[in-house]
Amino acid sequence: MLSSKGLKEAIEREEIYVDNGIDNLGENYIDVTLGDMLKIYDTPVLDIKTPSPTKIIKIPEEGLILEPNILYLGRTNEYTKTYGYVPLLSGLPELASLGVEIHITAGFGDNGFEGTWTLEIICANPTRVYPNIPVGRIYYYPLVGDSSIEYRGKYFGQIEATESRLSKEYSKKRVKEGGIKC
């Protein structure tokens, strides 16, 4: 894992880019903040083979109370780029002690990813959050092996909180099998 010195050097070499990254360096991480919009799925049942509609919720300056048993999709304010490292997004311990998780399973990023990070926010208790609050930390691990393989997948370049694009995987399979062409 990179220390603050290693992070500074990687930023200077343009292997890592995080908006305001130098200003938000910790001992071995870069702090990231919550954007001002959230999305929730707007359907009673999610189907992994079909895109699900979402509804946008603006987080007002006075805060928004998150409710348990609802998945909120948020995003970091910070746009990031990573080359030669594997980034790991982790929630703040202070939020965790309130029962708020910022990602369910998708904490690791990919070499070559560029974009904001979508946050998969859930909470154990009703919890008020505010726009632009510190919400997580990104840690960086050196990539071992072929660093020329760069991520250019379905989430590359995302800016807004991005709902699941898993249905695209099923569309590809149908095309390969000679089924419905999308």
Image (cartoon, grey):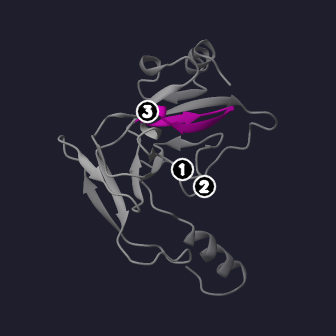
| Numbered range of the magenta stretch | 78-94
Residue 98, image x and y in percent? 41, 41
Figure quadrant of the N terminus = top right
Identify the secondary structure beneath mark 3: helix
Please tell me whether residue 161 is drawn above or below residue 116 in the rendered image.
below
Please identify the residue farthest to the top as the structure is shown: 5
Which numbered disc covers residue 94?
A: 3
Determine the image quadrant of residue 28: top right
Query: Seen in the image, is 36 located left or right of residue 114?
Result: left
Q: In percent of the image, x 51 and y 48: which residue is there?
A: 103
Please tell me whether residue 75 is drawn above or below residue 3 in the rendered image.
below
Identify the secondary structure beneath mark 1: loop
Q: Which residue is mark 1?
A: 156
Q: Which residue is mark 2?
A: 153
Determine the image quadrant of residue 55: bottom left
Q: Is residue 89 magenta?
A: yes
Q: Nearer the viewer, residue 26 or 128?
A: 128
Residue type at mark 2? Gly
How many other residues sit within 10 Å of disc 2, few (<14), some (14-19) or many (≥20)?
Answer: few
